[in-house]
Amino acid sequence: MAKLYIVPTPIGNLKDITLRAIKVLKKVDLILAEDTRTSGKLLKYYEISTPMQSHHMHNEHKTFSRIVEQIQSGATVALISDAGTPAISDPGFLLTRACVEAGIEVDCLPGATAFVPALVNSGLPNNKFFFEGFLPVKKGRQTRLKLLAKKESTMIFYESPHKLIKTLSHFVEYFGTERPVSVSREITKIHEETIRGTAQEVLNYYTKKPPKGEIVIVVGGTS
């Protein structure tokens, strides 16, 4: 039956994919990929020859209606991102919502996502947590940080390496120097590391050692 599959892909190590995900990617009619060059490496590794089409943040608002029509016409489609679970700080929400509204079945497979191992590795309370994702770059950032400073639950952020120092500096400023922080970098890859400490200690570490790779920041809630 025609449907949309949401398929998580490895966040680093190519072996971190489920057997079911491989089966789905081989049997669908079309794979929507954030970057076909990046996803092409994964598909080649698992000998998956399914046709791919670009579906990313710059074109998803223009293409999702046509994709919905394709599925309604009988096509089975899989949506993947460069790494992790689509729609989690990645393209996918617009298409998923459109399919739900059109009565199309959506099947999201379980699988890799960066914030779960980062949260567990942090050693911070994980019975309740708040996923913030990427903070606003400019407009609304200060207001957002002031609100987050009052949260009692553990908070999770995504950040790029060249903005990490700025973000950690803001955590020191708005959350306080002693707020517990854990930074996980390059999860599942060769140079994976997790640095834990106070906001000031972690800031000092990365000021001396500029980071590289994908980053997840986990911050303790206010006590």
Image (cartoon, rainbow, N blue to C red):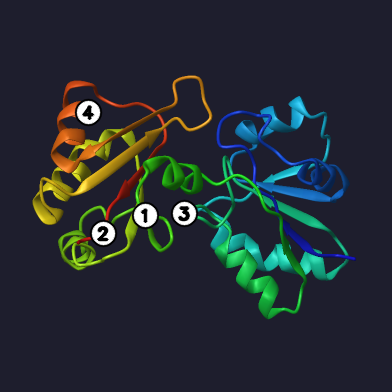
Report the Cα–Cα distance between label 1 and label 3: 23 Å
Instruction: Label 1, secondary structure: give it.
Output: loop
Q: Are marks 4 and 3 in contact (CB under 8 Å)?
A: no
Q: Amino acid at mark 4?
A: Tyr
Looking at the image, residue 223 lies above or below residue 11? below
Instruction: Label 2, secondary structure: give it.
Output: loop
Looking at the image, residue 114 lies above or below residue 222? above
Quadrant into which the C terminus falls:
bottom left
Report the Cα–Cα distance between label 2 and label 3: 22 Å
Q: Position of residue 163 (x, y in %)?
A: 25, 39
Q: Amino acid at mark 3?
A: Ser
- Residue occupied by mark 3: 89
Near mark 1 (Cα within 10 A), the count class, few <14, some 14-19 or many ≥20, is some
Q: Position of residue 166 (x, y in %)?
A: 18, 41
Q: Please report whichever mark, 2 or 3, sits nearer to the chain's N-terminal start.
A: 3
Report the Cα–Cα distance between label 2 and label 4: 22 Å
Q: Residue at x 15, y 55 (%)?
A: 175
- Residue occupied by mark 2: 221
Residue 65 falls left or right of residue 139 = right
Q: Amino acid at mark 2?
A: Gly
Report the Cα–Cα distance between label 2 and label 1: 9 Å
Q: Please report whichever mark, 2 or 4, sits nearer to the chain's N-terminal start.
A: 4
Which tag is nearer the camera, tag 4 or tag 1? 1
- Residue occupied by mark 4: 206
Q: Residue at x 74, y 33 (%)?
A: 43
